[in-house]
Amino acid sequence: MDSNNSSPWSFTLPSFLLCLSLCTHLCLGTNKLDENQSLSGNQTLTSSGGDFALGFFTPGKSSYSYIGIWYNKVREPPIVWVANRDNPVTDRYSTELKISDGNLIIVNGSQVPVWSTNLRTSSSGSSSMVAVLGDDGNFALKDGPNSSMTLWQIFDHMTDTWLPGAKLGIDKRKNTSQVLTSWKNTEDPSTGLFSLQLHPSNEYFIRWNMSFRYYTTGKWDIKNKVYDNVPELRANTIFDFIFVDNENESYFTYIRKKGITTPSRFVMNISGQVHMLFRFPS
Ligand SMILES: *[C@@H]1O[C@H](CO)[C@@H](O)[C@H](O)[C@H]1NC(C)=O
Ligand SMILES: *[C@@H]1O[C@H](CO)[C@@H](O)[C@H](O)[C@H]1NC(C)=O
Ligand SMILES: *[C@@H]1O[C@H](CO)[C@@H](O)[C@H](O)[C@H]1NC(C)=O
Ligand SMILES: *[C@@H]1O[C@H](CO)[C@@H](O)[C@H](O)[C@H]1NC(C)=O
Ligand SMILES: *[C@@H]1O[C@H](CO)[C@@H](O)[C@H](O)[C@H]1NC(C)=O
Ligand SMILES: *[C@@H]1O[C@H](CO)[C@@H](O)[C@H](O)[C@H]1NC(C)=O
Ligand SMILES: *[C@@H]1O[C@H](CO)[C@@H](O)[C@H](O)[C@H]1NC(C)=O
Ligand SMILES: *[C@@H]1O[C@H](CO)[C@@H](O)[C@H](O)[C@H]1NC(C)=O
């Protein structure tokens, strides 16, 4: 961590290179998984516009595999979400992602579940459940292909990356919140020590080991649309930030300004710094 820098929000411009071959894996050729399908080995799902892909990945020289989501049109694509971050598998060919008993689950080669969405399901669970990968990077479990009811979505279960359109806040009715948590290191996506979360006082805290708060954004300034300690947000020409606080929820979200379509994300990095990353349109 850079101790001279009082704000852990930094702005980085990586040079994303377009990958010529959009799909190097064996594709399922679809953006969804239904109850009769499973994904394993080199198979991937691709969002309908081709922006995001979901499948197994192996970080660096790790001997483990994880199911994750990455930018599909970028060389050495950054991983934006990891399912089984704390329960890696060693053999992606015998491991399967599938829908079972109303949940999305990952089972290893011995059919032992290593990850699950852990929804409490009713026996009357719909038989047409489907999990859809969207062009916003969200992967959502629904009770039917055209259902507007989302049963579970990765935007509520982020890992270290906050994508445009996702909410980072508190559901006051369910008393749940979204949390960004760093990877342990660049080759290990398991739950790291740094996390960013909204506090009921409407300030964001960055915590170390889920306890010690070493940074706060301060209060949201409604008039100037900025957090007291994050003036960088005001200077930007890329994103519009929206803060919502009502009886049901309070959250912060951001969208790309009109005309900006390039990959953009916030990441809690492994040293506890929040990076805002985007590529300028070429
Ligand atoms: C899954 O398979 C069963 C039995 O073959 C079939 O009745 C059902 O319609 C299939 N579901 C989907 C979503 O294709
Ligand atoms: C899976 O992808 C890897 C890396 O691209 C490749 O080496 C391997 O042969 C592929 N396996 C199969 C079964 O296609
Ligand atoms: C699946 O997980 C169980 C429990 O961790 C383990 O005992 C078993 O060896 C695993 N199977 C494979 C094929 O990795
Ligand atoms: C879902 O909506 C699409 C487009 O509106 C339609 O073509 C399709 O038939 C619908 N599927 C079901 C199961 O209703
Ligand atoms: C909400 O959850 C937090 C921790 O998850 C707990 O400390 C708090 O007491 C809960 N509040 C209510 C009203 O249940
Ligand atoms: C994090 O906190 C837990 C207790 O909440 C403690 O057992 C653990 O040692 C702490 N980790 C580090 C790296 O200090
Ligand atoms: C809060 O939730 C209730 C129940 O779903 C709904 O009727 C109400 O309009 C919501 N309030 C706001 C401000 O969205
Ligand atoms: C995390 O971000 C800080 C600030 O930009 C940077 O100095 C540090 O090298 C980053 N850590 C890693 C592992 O990328």
Image (spheres, helix red, strand yellow):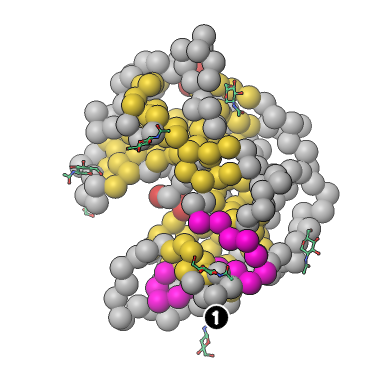
Report the predominant secondary structure element of the magenta stretch.
loop
| Any part of residue 68 in sight | yes
Q: Position of residue 72 (x, y in %)?
A: 69, 51
Determine the residue positioned at 34% across, 25% down: 213
Camera sees residue 96: no
User: Which amino acid is tagged 1?
Assistant: Asn
Task: Choose between 234 and 109: the one closer to the eye.
Answer: 109
From this view, report whether residue 46 is shown above or below residue 18. Answer: below
- Quadrant in the picture for residue 141: bottom left
Query: Which of the two residues, 49 or 173, is positioned nearer the viewer here?
Result: 173
Identified at 48% across, 38% down, the residue is: 192
Q: Is residue 226 above or below residue 193?
A: above
Q: Quadrant of the C terminus?
A: top right
Q: Position of residue 38 (x, y in %)?
A: 58, 74
Name the secondary structure under disc 1: loop
Q: Is residue 86 left or right of residue 252?
A: right
Q: Is residue 280 left or right of residue 113?
A: right
Image quarter for ligand 8: top right
Rendering quarter of residue 65: bottom right
| 100 inside magenta stretch | yes
- The image shows residue 88, relative to residue 9, as above or below, that is below
Determine which residue is flagged by label 1: 36
Image: magenta residue range: 87-103
Residue sitting farthest toward the top:
4
State the image coordinates of residue 6 (x, y, percent, origin top left): 46, 12
Q: Is mark 1 within 8 Å of ligand 1?
A: yes
User: Which residue is nearer to you in this view: 29 or 89?
Assistant: 89
Q: Residue at x 34, y 39 (%)?
A: 169
Q: Could you tell me which residue is drawn at 33 percent across and 19 percent down?
A: 218
